[in-house]
């Protein structure tokens, strides 16, 4: 009988904690609009978050993590793509209510993100109900959990950063409008800029602490700037001229509803606070207008005609050049037919004009009205 040899267990490898070192926000290169939008949302999370659209590898997640590092003690919460609504907003334990008469809240990811950054990758692939819950909490700073007619609320003030690759599908317009600010990134095509970005990333991967030390002063200045702007924000007000300027820009963009106007004013106030001004100016509105209105702007063809307004029609025939004369007896030319049709009451492009047609009397054959032989 062959003896059974003792099984020798392999040594368990030593586990090391993962590094929480992130690429410094101040070291981002060629992302001025993205940095501006993220800083504005950090100063006033009530703006409603930032949607970053762009191809793969354009530093979307890197920028979001770097923003959280500017907020001392702020959590960075990443939303899993397969997360359920209950995992995100939380749930109420009715079993506890039946047992001891108290309803207990099991908090979700929104509660964990309070005071920090909630990062949602591929937001365009999430169910609409989940995106609705995220945007509601981001804009209001409050999360409501409901179950079987019972509801509980808790604070959920966080900076929402959503990213998407347009090649994988778009966000529905109704949800797109609810994001406060939007930034569209492109692949860097300038050779010098591309080299600078690659060198910066390689240097960080090789020695993160050296890169952090190199940008420590700029990082500290950004941390102090955001903190001071947050403290000064409630004291800043909008003048009538600033409000009029913002609403005029929103009207020009044909922004649906008033959300664009409100975001425009809130973001302009955050910009003024970042710059250390005592009031909001029209220049602040202009500086952030594209971030607030680019994803709300409608093309002229898509703009609805207000009730009571006359729809656009072709100009009357007197304002157009007379059609060229055709030889007598010849059918009208193609140009003449188009001109005549354009002047028709209904404006049917391409319709043929009325032409005289000879008519011959018809002899009745039998039936009513026929003459007897």
Image: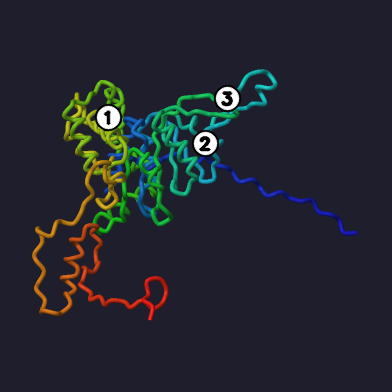
Considering the numbered disc 1 on the image, is that residue within a helix, a strand or a loop?
helix
- In terms of depth relative to the viewer, which is nearer, 212 or 300? 300
Considering the numbered disc 2 on the image, is that residue within a helix, a strand or a loop?
helix
Of the residues under marks 1 and 3, which one precedes in the sequence? 3
Of the residues under marks 1 and 2, which one precedes in the sequence? 2
Mark 2 to mark 3 CA distance (whole Å): 18 Å
Mark 1 to mark 3 CA distance (whole Å): 42 Å
Considering the numbered disc 3 on the image, is that residue within a helix, a strand or a loop?
strand
- Checking the image for residue 150, the label placed there is 3
Can residue 213 be seen in this snapshot? no
Please state the horizontal and vertical placement of residue 67, each as a whole percent of the image: 36, 37
For the point 51% across and 46% down, which residue is it?
Answer: 81
- In the rendered image, which quarter is residue 210 located in? top left
- In terms of depth relative to the viewer, which is nearer, 194 or 112? 112
Q: In the figure, 267 relative to 103: above or below?
A: below
100 sits left or right of 81 in the view: right
157 sits left or right of 198 in the view: right
Image quadrant occupied by the N terminus: bottom right
Q: In the figure, 8 relative to 213: above or below?
A: below
Residue, disc 2: 88
Residue, disc 1: 225
Q: Residue furthest bottom?
A: 373
Please state the horizontal and vertical placement of residue 302, each as a whole percent of the image: 29, 50
Q: In the figure, 297 relative to 4: above or below?
A: above
**Neighbourhood count class around disc 1 (C-alpha, 10 Å): few under 14, some 14–19, many 20 upward:** some
Please state the horizontal and vertical placement of residue 238, each as a whole percent of the image: 21, 26
Q: Residue furthest top?
A: 101
Q: In the figure, 155 relative to 181: above or below?
A: above
Mark 1 to mark 2 CA distance (whole Å): 31 Å
């Amino acid at each position: 009988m062959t003896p059974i040899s003792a099984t020798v267990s392999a040594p368990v490898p030593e586990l090391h904690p993962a590094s929480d070192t992130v690429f410094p926000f101040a070291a981002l290169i060629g992302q001025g609009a993205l940095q501006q939008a993220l800083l504005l949302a950090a100063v006033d999370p009530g703006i409603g978050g930032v949607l970053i659209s762009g191809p793969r590898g354009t530093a979307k997640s890197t920028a979001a993590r770097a923003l959280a590092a500017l907020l001392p003690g702020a959590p960075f919460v990443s939303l899993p793509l397969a997360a359920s609504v209950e995992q995100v907003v939380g749930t109420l334990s009715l079993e506890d209510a039946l047992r001891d008469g108290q309803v207990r809240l099991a908090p979700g990811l929104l509660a964990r993100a309070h005071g920090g950054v909630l990062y949602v990758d591929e937001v365009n692939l999430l169910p609409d109900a989940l995106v609705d819950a995220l945007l509601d909490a981001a804009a209001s700073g409050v999360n409501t959990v409901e179950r079987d007619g019972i509801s509980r609320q808790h604070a959920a003030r966080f900076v929402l950063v959503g990213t998407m690759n347009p090649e994988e599908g778009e966000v529905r317009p109704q949800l797109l409008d609810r994001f406060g600010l939007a930034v569209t990134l492109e692949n860097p095509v300038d050779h010098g800029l591309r080299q600078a970005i690659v060198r910066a990333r390689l240097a960080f991967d090789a020695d993160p602490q050296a890169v952090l030390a190199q940008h420590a002063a700029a990082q500290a200045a950004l941390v102090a700037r955001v903190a001071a702007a947050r403290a000064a924000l409630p004291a800043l007000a909008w003048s009538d001229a600033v409000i009029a300027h913002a609403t005029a820009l929103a009207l020009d963009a044909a922004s649906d509803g008033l959300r664009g106007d409100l975001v425009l004013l809130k973001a302009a106030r955050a910009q003024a606070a970042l710059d250390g001004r005592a009031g909001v100016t029209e220049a602040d509105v202009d500086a952030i207008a594209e971030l607030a209105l680019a994803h709300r702007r409608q093309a002229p063809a898509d703009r609805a005609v207000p009730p009571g307004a006359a729809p656009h029609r072709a100009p009357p025939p007197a304002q157009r050049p007379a059609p060229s004369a055709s030889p007598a007896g010849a059918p009208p030319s193609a140009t003449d037919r188009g001109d005549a049709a354009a002047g028709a009451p209904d404006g049917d492009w391409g319709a043929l004009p009325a032409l005289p047609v000879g008519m011959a009397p018809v002899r009745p054959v039998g039936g009513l009205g026929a003459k007897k032989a």
